[in-house]
């Protein structure tokens, strides 16, 4: 399967650079995965598109303000570090700007008297971004990052983060800190929309998958099958596993809110046993030909060309249907990517 089959032309001005004026006001395209038919609505009216008893599964991961800026002690030059995960006390694996200069022993100073030293290359389990190990003294804490860190906006948002992103680049239900990028399908939901879902008898459950930088990487291999998928950690609570298994037994649809929720559910599904609760990690790569086991419906954003996320959506609804829907979204001037509009595939 050729990677170019998942490319499309997108005018740059349709890439959303800011969130909608008010959360929950985005447009919604509805795609019927059986017929390919499309309809247009708004996220605020999502409740009208779902039947009572539908189980919606949300990813409750919270984005860490993990982008920090330091000055090289020897030259005074500024460098950016995006902290991905804590390896041990004081030591983080990070993506760094000016990577070729990040040799072992190079030292940096950060705000509030924090110093750092490059220990060497990281051993990232993600496919794509090269990383370094950085030792901080005193150790960098979550409180420190909340004070001095910046929101790690994706690379297609061509601006610095601002006060609006502190709130709008988090879902209203985020709980578990650890993502380097937001599970952005959930950005559309307000407390009011969630309450309307509850009032209709639509059930809710959560999983946790901490989103890594690999989610933004295009597939660079000529064929889809040649791509090495990045690894991400997930957790399925016992209550969620029970809710999903009840829905499947009773014939009620399971709706994944976002590709991260879908990947978690499909990765944790055991043939003949059903959904397995607990923690795990996955490199699951979903593209056309995949047989879905746990998920019946998908609420998602519009994704980047040649991305694994677009391939996942194409596996769910069919490549021709999804590419056709994207072409219509361009004609109708939908907003794309993290701060953009949404699609319901049912």
Image: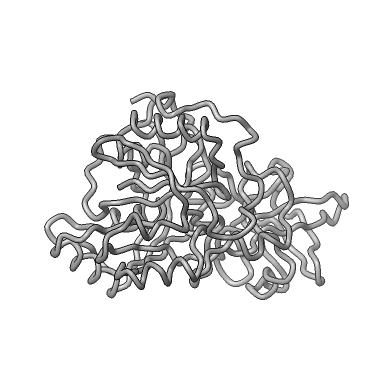
Q: Which of 143 and 117 is in front in this view?
A: 143
Give how far across and how far down residue 34 sits, in percent: 24, 39
Give how far across and how far down residue 99 sits, in percent: 69, 43
Q: Which residue is drawn at 40% across and 63% down?
A: 58
Give how far across and how far down residue 43 sits, in percent: 46, 55
Colour convention: one colour
Residue 253 lies left or right of residue 116; in this view the side is: left
Residue 57 lies left or right of residue 141; in this view the side is: left
Residue 171 lies left or right of residue 142; in this view the side is: left
Image: 139 above or below 289: below
Q: Residue at x 27, y 60 (%)?
A: 51
Image: 227 above or below 168: above
Name the quadrant of the N terminus: top left
Choose top left, top right, bottom left or bottom right for residue 108: bottom right
Q: Residue at x 49, y 72 (%)?
A: 175
Residue 32 lies left or right of residue 232; in this view the side is: left
Choose top left, top right, bottom left or bottom right for residue 64: bottom right
Q: Nearer the viewer, residue 68 or 106?
A: 68
How many labels, in total?
0
Give how far across and how far down residue 324 sits, in percent: 39, 29
């Amino acid at each position: 399967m050729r990677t170019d089959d998942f490319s499309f032309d997108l005018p740059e001005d349709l890439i959303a650079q800011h969130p909608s004026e008010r959360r929950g006001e985005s447009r919604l395209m509805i795609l019927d995965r059986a017929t390919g038919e499309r309809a247009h609505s708004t996220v605020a009216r999502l409740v009208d598109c779902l039947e009572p008893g539908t189980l919606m599964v949300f990813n409750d991961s919270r984005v860490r303000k993990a982008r920090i800026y330091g000055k090289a002690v020897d030259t005074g030059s500024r460098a950016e570090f995006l902290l991905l995960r804590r390896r041990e006390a004081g030591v983080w694996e990070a993506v760094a700007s000016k990577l070729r200069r990040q040799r072992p022993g190079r030292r940096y100073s950060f705000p509030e008297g924090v110093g750092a030293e490059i220990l060497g290359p990281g051993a990232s389990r993600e496919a794509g971004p090269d990383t370094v190990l950085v030792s901080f003294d005193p150790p960098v804490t979550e409180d420190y990052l909340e004070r001095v860190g910046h929101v790690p906006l994706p690379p297609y948002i061509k601006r610095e983060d601002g006060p609006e992103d502190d709130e709008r680049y988090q879902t209203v239900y985020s709980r578990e800190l650890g993502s380097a990028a937001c599970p952005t399908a959930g950005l559309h939901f307000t407390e009011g929309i969630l309450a309307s879902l509850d009032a209709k008898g639509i059930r809710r459950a959560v999983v946790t998958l901490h989103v890594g930088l690999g989610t933004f990487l295009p597939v660079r291999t000529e064929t889809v099958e040649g791509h090495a998928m990045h690894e991400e950690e997930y957790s399925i609570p016992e209550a969620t596993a029970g809710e999903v298994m009840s829905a499947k037994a009773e014939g009620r649809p399971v709706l994944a809110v976002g590709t991260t929720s879908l990947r978690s559910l499909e990765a944790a599904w055991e043939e003949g046993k059903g959904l397995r609760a607990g923690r795990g990690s996955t490199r699951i790569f979903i593209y056309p030909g995949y047989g879905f086991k746990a998920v019946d419906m998908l609420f998602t954003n519009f994704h980047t060309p040649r991305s694994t996320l677009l391939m996942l959506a194409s596996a769910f609804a069919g490549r021709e249907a999804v590419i056709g829907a994207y072409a219509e979204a361009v004609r109708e001037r939908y907003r794309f990517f993290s701060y953009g509009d949404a699609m319901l595939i049912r």
